[in-house]
Image (cartoon, rainbow, N blue to C red):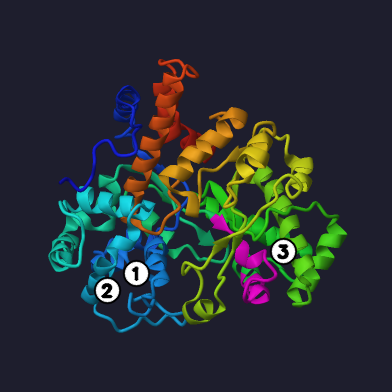
């Protein structure tokens, strides 16, 4: 049995499936625009071989290890680094065997689709991973990783990645992006400006981070005006390394448009560690509006990723740090939360604000109606827990009737798992082609319009929205 079904994710009805397949054939080999993600720019800077199969597929991928952890597998046993930067002393082959022993836990999940796609299309693995064949498959992948054809830059080119954006903190020195630029390699790897660490008063080390921001920008960040100038300086610096976007991962979608005096007073309290939770949220909200105004000046596309209760387990956060699978979706209000920002800049046609959500109930009720009328707003694709075939289909079903297709931005993979990038884009292209085929079959879309839309959803919308 082939590891991958050629008609996966296409409709069951034979006639509609045939149409979906034809649409997919027209977009399957398009270049990949990956405008938002978390791949490590160091990979492309140094172009060293990936260490081993476990380091590539298991240890860095919280989609994978959170599922195993939910069934009692310890993060230490999977080689996940601890908060202090040390790594457990475990044999990568034993990590791989543990992964294979529990591979059945991923049945029916998008992670299983992505992994099987990577195993089959990248490493030519032709049978499903299991506890019995784990060692042989490890050896097969490990042998490939030792060759030049499987180094990061070679895979980047093989995956037909036209452009990829990593995401760095506002106080990152961008050394790896500089190294990529200076190497002369033609691969387009850009950064994105992520200022959470210097915008969120509740972020660990906020005051120290703001001081570093001042040092890096040459501005006096003990003052409100100097702090804003430092952001402008760093945004310009990031643009010098190809940045076309900013990214904001706030607990809520709250925005504010405070007077400068009130904002300055809040900033002083934040630096002194004296903000209440309400004041911290108000400051974050005001800074979203400040960031939007800065985008009017420097043309950076603004991404807002609200609604995650970050690091829900205090124990795991203390032991292993951030991004270890314990970020949990919350209910999110957009209609009231975004009004201050939209009152300030919502009708500007020279601004793009891309909204994401972990609260699917907001798609039809709030997000599609907002994006369907405010010129600055666009809807980001299904994100994180909803980055799945069902989530993608629900997104199209709940947003298209109100926002249409052209107020969305195509697909982005938002991943740290490099080899899953082509898999994720393949899933999105298949689901979108299935959706379009159903529209044609039910008389809601003319047959000659579907190929153009398929191309837009797979490539054109993302390229234009992110100015890549």
Please name the residue that numbered disc 1 is placed on: 59
Distance, label 1 to label 3, CA atoms, is 37 Å
Q: Residue at x 26, y 72 (%)?
A: 98
Q: Nearer the viewer, residue 214 or 428?
A: 428
Secondary structure found at label 2 = helix
Few, some or many residues within 10 Å of mark 2 (<14, 14–19, 20+): many
- Res. 227 mark: 3
Q: Is residue 390 above or below residue 456?
A: below
Q: Are marks 2 and 1 in contact (CB under 8 Å)?
A: yes
Residue at x 55% of width, y 48% of height: 245
Q: CA distance from mark 2 to mark 1?
A: 8 Å
Q: Which residues are magenta?
A: 193-212
Q: Earlier in the sequence, mark 2 or mark 1?
A: 1
Residue extending farthest to the front is: 13
Q: Percent x, y for residue 12? A: 33, 32
Q: Residue at x 35, y 52 (%)?
A: 108
Q: Nearer the viewer, residue 253 or 275?
A: 253
Q: Which residue is mark 2?
A: 95
State how far apart marks 2 and 3 are (Cα).
Answer: 45 Å
């Amino acid at each position: 049995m082939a590891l991958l079904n050629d008609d996966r994710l296409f409709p069951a009805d034979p006639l509609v499936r045939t149409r979906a397949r034809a649409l997919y054939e027209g977009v399957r080999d398009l270049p990949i625009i990956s405008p938002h993600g978390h791949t490590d720019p160091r990979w492309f800077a140094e172009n060293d071989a990936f260490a081993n199969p476990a380091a590539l597929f298991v240890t860095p991928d919280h989609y994978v290890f959170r599922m195993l952890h939910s069934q009692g597998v310890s993060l230490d046993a999977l080689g996940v680094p601890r908060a202090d930067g040390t790594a457990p002393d475990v044999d990568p082959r034993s990590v791989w065997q543990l992964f294979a022993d529990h591979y059945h836990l991923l049945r029916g999940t998008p992670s299983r689709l992505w992994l099987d796609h990577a195993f089959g299309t990248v490493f030519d693995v032709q049978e499903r991973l299991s506890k019995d064949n784990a060692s042989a498959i490890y050896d097969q992948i490990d042998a490939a990783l030792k060759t030049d054809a499987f180094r990061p830059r070679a895979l980047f080119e093989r995956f037909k990645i036209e452009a990829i954006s990593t995401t760095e903190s506002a106080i990152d020195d961008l050394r790896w992006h500089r190294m990529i630029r200076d190497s002369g390699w033609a691969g387009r790897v850009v950064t994105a400006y992520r200022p959470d660490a210097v915008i969120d008063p509740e972020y660990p080390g906020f005051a120290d981070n703001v001081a570093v921001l001042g040092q890096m920008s040459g501005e006096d960040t003990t003052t409100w005006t100097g702090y804003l100038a430092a952001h402008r300086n760093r945004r310009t610096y990031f643009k010098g390394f190809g940045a076309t976007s900013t990214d904001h991962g706030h607990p809520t979608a709250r925005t504010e448009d405070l007077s400068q005096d009130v904002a300055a007073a809040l900033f002083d309290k934040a630096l002194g560690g004296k903000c209440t939770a309400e004041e911290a949220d108000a400051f974050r909200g005001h800074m979203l509006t400040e960031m939007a105004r800065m985008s009017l000046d420097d043309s950076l596309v603004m991404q807002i990723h609200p609604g995650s209760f970050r690091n829900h387990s205090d124990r795991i956060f203390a032991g292993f740090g951030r991004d270890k699978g314990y970020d949990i979706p919350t209910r999110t209000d957009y209609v009231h939360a975004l009004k201050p920002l939209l009152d300030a800049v919502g009708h500007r046609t020279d601004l793009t604000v891309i909204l994401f959500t972990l609260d699917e109930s907001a798609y039809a009720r709030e997000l599609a109606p907002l994006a369907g009328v405010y010129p600055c707003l666009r809807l980001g694709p299904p994100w994180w827990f909803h980055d799945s075939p069902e989530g993608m289909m629900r997104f199209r079903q709940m947003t298209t009737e109100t926002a249409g297709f052209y107020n969305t931005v195509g697909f982005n993979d938002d991943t740290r798992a490099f080899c899953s990038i082509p898999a994720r884009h393949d899933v999105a292209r298949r689901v979108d082609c299935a959706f379009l085929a159903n529209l044609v079959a039910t008389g809601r879309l003319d047959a000659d319009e579907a190929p153009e839309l398929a191309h837009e959803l797979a490539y054109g919308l993302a390229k234009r929205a992110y100015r890549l």
